[in-house]
Image (cartoon, rainbow, N blue to C red):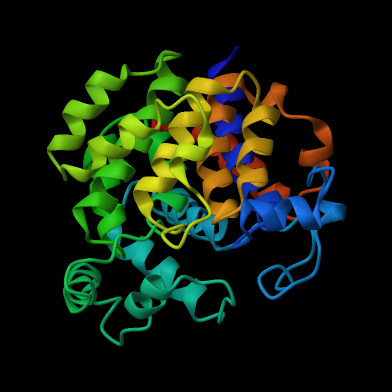
Amino acid sequence: MSQADKIKGALFGQAIGDALGAGTEFMTRAEVQQHYPTGLRNYSQIREGAYRSFRPKGYWTDDTEMMLCIARSLIKEKEINYTSIASEFKAWYNTNPPDIGNQTRCVLGHPQYEQEPFRVSRAVWQLTGEKSAGNGGIMRTSIVGLLPCNVIKEAESICKLTHFDPRCVGSCVIYSILIHSLVYHNTVPPMSELKEISIQYDEQIEKFLNLAESDTLTALALDDKAMGYTLKTLAAALWCLHHCNSFEEGLFAMIDAGGDADTNAAVACSLLGAKYGYHSIPHTYIDGLIKKEELNKVAEYFETIHLHL
């Protein structure tokens, strides 16, 4: 399998998981079974509802929109430029996206954000009592793992542009390392190595890495009240990486589990796309995506990124 196939798999995997996952977002597992008794398996099946009527079927949500903000900055600047990324985030915020997360809205809505993004991000986190650790950072981070170098540093910094909590930062670092290892080295770092890395950020991360080794996905309780927690999303993605034997198997596992399904599926399916490649993704999911041309442009850029960085 070529490196280009893995890059494209990671990008399209994220977008597909996001777009289809929107159909069961914020549902409990029982509600998913009630609304989709044979399973949600195609964009056309997505039911209208409070959280699913913002966009046409086959269109991704804020997860992939923010990933593309990072991509646009990188393609424009030919390097990682935090001020530029912050400006892309702000421009997206100014479109009044209906599905933006609460913490991201608070950070990007601050009048001084573009001038001092890290200070604003830290201040918003401190106002929560340093307790907010949503998955708004990890949901957009697949693209950081595609960088050919400096992955840990960039994952830390780009996460902190909106999410300053060390649990968020650590989960973004681990996720980026996984994407990078799959794409550039065709390997999955052992869990013991990931646990050693996690200790550098927050002791809670190891607990969720252990949960990712559970035999069943139910151990993660993805549809409970803490469904938007960054460590749940990380653990769900790792569970899929180690337990699912195909892209589709992981996609369906995330969709059927409910909870923050679009983000969980976006993160998990980016890993599975990097592992199994673009060629493994059924064409029905690719063909049904709206605006997939932008994903192709990003993939083409990453095939030659080593010439720029």
Q: Give the quarter of the figure containing the N terminus.
A: top right
| Horizontal side, residue 50 vs residue 133: left or right | right
Residue 90 or residue 172, whichever sits in front: 172
On the image, the x and y values in percent for residue 277 come to 62, 22
| Number of dots carrying numbers | 0
Against 93, residue 153 (above or below) is above
On screen, residue 257 above or below 62: above
Residue 41 showing in the rendered view: yes
Between 81 and 238, the one nearer to me in the picture = 238
Identity of the residue drawn at 69% across and 37% down: 252
Residue 265 screen position, x and y as percent: 58, 44
**As drawn, 130 above or below 276:** below
* Residue 171 falls left or right of residue 141: left
> Could you say which quadrant of the image residue 189 lies in?
top left
The quarter in which the C terminus is drawn is top left
In percent of width and height, residue 30 lies at 67, 53
Of 42 and 148, nearer the camera is: 42
Residue at the far left in the pictured view: 200
Left or right of 90 in this view: 289: right
Residue positioned 25% across, 83% down in the render: 112
* Residue at image point 71% right, 22% down: 279
In terms of image quadrants, where is residue 184?
A: top left
- Residue 303 visible? The answer is no
Please provide percent x and percent y for residue 242.
Answer: 48, 21
